Amino acid sequence: MVGSTSVEAFDPDAALPHLRALADPTRLRIVALLGNGPRCVCSLQEEVDVAGNLLSHHLRVLREAGLIEGARRGRWIDYRLLPEAFDGIERLLAGLREGGAATCCATVTPRASARRPATRAAAS
């Protein structure tokens, strides 16, 4: 039997922006670096092998997903992880591991492209 905490932890709508942001290898590398503590963007630039404008793009995606935040320090911006976002991801994964997805998959709406009209075969 699945406990109510597992079902409550599985919220695909809330989790998708986080998971999409983390699905990119460069963004995952940035998050791993920030896991060691706040870092200046110049420090991240030294560690992540991408052009400066692309690094800014990845940081913006992570910020908009609510995974990191930046604090201006003069000309530089220091970035840090937002622990509460990762707490939610941990709860999601724990819920999946415990079988929470089995009782909640019905709440996920299939993509429109995956659905076929029932009258399509009759029209042919």
Image (cartoon, grey):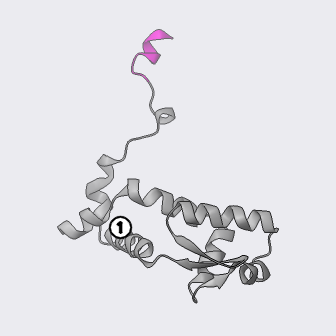
Q: Residue at x 57, y 67 (%)?
A: 22
Which of the 4 image quadrants contains residue 47?
Answer: bottom right
Q: Is residue 2 visible?
A: no
Residue linked to disc 1: 96
Q: Residue at x 25, y 63 (%)?
A: 8
Task: Check the picture and name the quadrant holding the N terminus.
Answer: bottom left
Foreground residue among 64 and 19: 64
Q: Residue at x 25, y 56 (%)?
A: 103
Q: x%, y% of residue 39? A: 64, 84
Q: x%, y% of residue 49? A: 80, 75
**Region rendered in magenta:** 117-124
Which of the 4 image quadrants contains residue 24?
Answer: bottom right
Residue 122 shown in magenta: yes
Drawn side of residue 75 relative to residue 98, left or right: right
Foreground residue among 35 and 20: 35
- In the rendered structure, which amino acid carries the disc numbered 1? Leu
Q: Residue furthest bottom?
A: 36
Q: Residue furthest top?
A: 123
Which of the 4 image quadrants contains residue 25?
Answer: bottom right
Drawn side of residue 50 relative to residue 36, left or right: right
Q: x%, y% of residue 46? A: 79, 82
101 to 74, vertically: above or below:
above
Q: Badge 1 local density, few (<14 within 10 Å), some, or many (20+)?
A: some
Drawn side of residue 64 relative to residue 116, left or right: right
Q: x%, y% of residue 33? A: 63, 83
